[in-house]
Amino acid sequence: MEPGGARNVLTQLRRGVLEHCVLSLLGDEPRYGFDLVKRLGEDDVMVTSEGTIYPLLSRLRRDGWVSTTWVESESGPPRRYYALTAEGRAALTAFRADWARFRDAVDGLLAEGAS
Amino acid sequence: MNAVDPLVADYLERLDRAAAALPADRRAELVLEIRDHITAAQAAGATGDADLREVLVRLGSPDEIAEAASDDRPPAAPGAYRRPGTGTELAAVLLLTLGSLFPVAGWLAGAVLLWTSRRWRVREKLLGTLVVPFGPGGLLVLAPLLHARTETCASGPVPVGAADGLIVQETVTCTTTGGGPPWLFPWAALAAGVASVVLAVLLYRTARRRADAEAPVAGGAPGASPWGSLEVGGVLTLGIGGLLAPFVGPLVGFVLVCCSARWTTREKVVAGALAVLPLLLALTGLLVVRSSG
């Protein structure tokens, strides 16, 4: 399969999952946008283009799953600080359950075809 | 604040043009966020041209970013998620205690709801059924039957001596058998009432705690309840049918319940057993009363 085809599969897989990973990163404490992007960008398989995280964060904000505050920073302009809302937390809890079932199902199916 | 590097300025301008299709506020916000990201990267140590280029490469092409921003789906409805409801468990607990005042049927309905709930373990369900079977109200009805005091009176002539010879008098002698100690009944009933209420509260709180730990239910969707119209009709007939048509009523209810696709076999068996139990007890009670009368 050509590289283009493989990239398409990953793109499809990331869809819907990436935003919940963002929610999870905010699970313990609120974080700056830059921090989130850096953390997600550590794994190439999760993010190919760091800039696309910002539209994703905007969407999470519009959906009401994430709230933002501006915090003054000594070393530059005020920075955006993201936090989970109660709804976002509920969405995250639901996703954790769904993902576990989905992942186990896929692993099971892939294991059958491997022999 | 330092002047914006020409490399960065060029990048941001290309991003602005790529985002031309977006609404003005989102376009401006996007450019602002990317600009702040670059500033933050610079503050974190990306100083030279090579570093800056790497930051921009990692950000991705302006076209990609703008495309991600316009990749819109309708926003999730507010209140899309709610925590799972515990209405069934509340009804179960109320019926087992207060509902037991409505003879047999009330408690039976509560017991069926207890056993079909997915939020209680078998151990807890057994407790709920056996700690005060038929509920405090049921005991009020059954206890007098079990502790029936029977008085047997016999009358017969008893010779009584008198000054001028024997006189025969009619005397009635009564003996009382059975019954528990007089103080037992009201106290036992009180203890039963308190025990069942305390247990009901504990059961409900356990159910509420377990429900909160479950995944939230999509707002509006009922979430696979074991109670459809067939199940409700079946259980009502099981409980109240006995009053309308002895034996046949509960049997019809049991058949309805067996037709349900929402109940497991074990739940159906329990419903059937609970339906048969009061009938058996009533029969036993009748036989006991008849034979001792």
Image (spheres, rainbow, N blue to C red):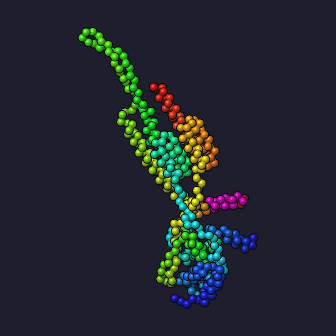
Taking depth in this image into account, of B292 and B265 the one nearest to the observer is B292
Coordinates of residue B40 in the picture (x, y in percent): 54, 82
Residue A22 visible from this viewpoint: no
Point out residue B50 in the picture as x, y percentages from the top left corner.
61, 86
| Residue at point 43%, 47% (across, down) | B197
Figure label count: 0
Task: Give the residue furthest to the front.
Answer: B244
Tell me: residue B30, above or below residue B114.
below
In the image, residue B215 above or below residue B276 = below
Q: Position of residue B202 (x, y in %)?
A: 45, 50
Task: Give yes or no for residue B40 being in the magenta stretch.
Answer: no
Residue sitting at the far left? B163
Residue furthest right in the image: A1
Q: In screen coordinates, is B94 left or right of B156?
A: right
Residue shown at 46% from the left, 42% from the top: B101
**Image point (60%, 69%), residue name:** B75
Q: Which residues are magenta?
A: A101-113
Q: Where is A39 relative to A98, above or below?
A: below
> Residue at image x 70%, y 72%?
A7
Front residue of this view, candidates B49 and B73: B73
Considering only vertical position in the picture, is A69 above or below B186? below
Is B125 displayed left or right of A2 in the figure? left
Confirm whether residue A81 shows in the render.
yes
Looking at the magenta stretch, what is its main secondary structure?
helix
Location of the C terminus of chain B by quadrant is: top left
